[in-house]
Amino acid sequence: VLALMAAWDVALGAGFRAGLTTIVVTPYLVLAGGCLWRAGGLLGWTPAGLGLAGLGANAPLAMLRLVVDLTIATGLIALVMQRLIARVRHLTRRDALTGLLNRRAIEDHLARLQALTERGCANAVMVLDVDHFKRINDELGHAGGDAALQHLAAVLGATLRDTDCFGRLGGEEFAVLLPDTELDGAMLVAERLRELLQKHPLAWGDKLWPISASFGVATMRAGDTHGHGALSRADAAMYAAKARGRNRVLRAAGEAEFA
């Protein structure tokens, strides 16, 4: 049962926080230590050297117990290591402030989507940037600015598909990778996110602060290097949206007209 619980934790617990990781792995380390201690108690010095000492006819049974204890200890330690490795991988691929994918993870997913694009799959990229973020920082302070970014991540992340990749590129700029999505579908998703953000202001202090963002959308094309071309086109469209008044969605230049 303990082994199954640990395996479940390894499989599903990549998003657990550090404190929970400690709580989860500690019992298994204690159990592994107990097994090793008991295994050590079965060993002792004989005239021939280290071996099963003073057990006489019970030596075969003691050997079996030794093998079982060492096997259990090794398995528990392996499960703990898997859990810790999963935690480290989680930390290296997540943005510390928002918990979203970081730029490195987004670029890895982008490269994988580019490989699918080369085989004829339709994929899209969305870049969004918080409007007037400097003003938010100036009026609410850096803590308020951080809260605004966390608020955006929570509001938008709750409505995306499990297959979508949502990450923070840096500062107040975010990206969403949309697998199996044509331009029209990506534009609809971006517009839905824009409206959703507008309907959910940030509660800070005793006031509600409106938060909006500008969106740029691009489809991935065969021949783009690791998908960076689509990301750049979406980024340019996002800046064009800002230039046209902010709080809007624009497709990248050269994309088919959105109906």
Image (cartoon, rainbow, N blue to C red):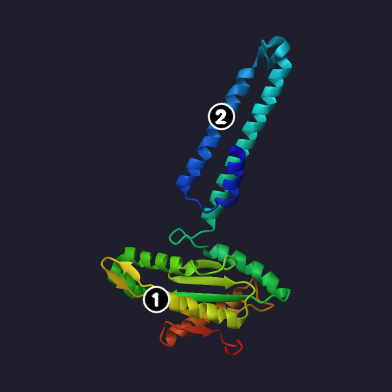
What SS does tag 2 mark?
helix
Q: Identity of the amino acid at label 1?
A: Lys
What SS does tag 1 mark?
helix
Please tell me in which quadrant of the rendered image residue 108 appears: bottom right
Q: Residue at x 53, y 67 (%)?
A: 166
Taking depth in this image into account, of 134 and 58 the one nearest to the observer is: 58
How far is the residue under mark 2 from the one under mark 1?
54 Å
Q: Identity of the amino acid at label 2?
A: Gly
Depth check, mark 2 against mark 1: the one in front is 1
* Percent of width and height locating residue 130: 42, 74
* Percent of width and height locating residue 104: 56, 63
Q: Residue at x 61, y 39 (%)?
A: 3
* Percent of width and height locating residue 88: 54, 50
Q: Is residue 132 above or below residue 110?
A: below
Quadrant of image for the C terminus: bottom right
Please tell me in which quadrant of the rendered image residue 28 appears: top right
The residue carrying pointer 2 sits among few (fewer than 14), some (14 to 19) or many (20 or more) residues within 10 Å by Cα, namely some
Q: Residue furthest front?
A: 1
Q: Is residue 192 left or right of residue 5?
A: left
Q: Is residue 117 left or right of residue 246?
A: right
Taking depth in this image into account, of 164 and 227 the one nearest to the observer is: 164
Taking depth in this image into account, of 129 and 201 the one nearest to the observer is: 201
Quadrant of image for the N terminus: top right
**Residue pointed to by mark 2:** 33
Marking on residue 199? 1
Q: Residue at x 45, y 62 (%)?
A: 98
Q: Earlier in the sequence, mark 2 or mark 1?
A: 2
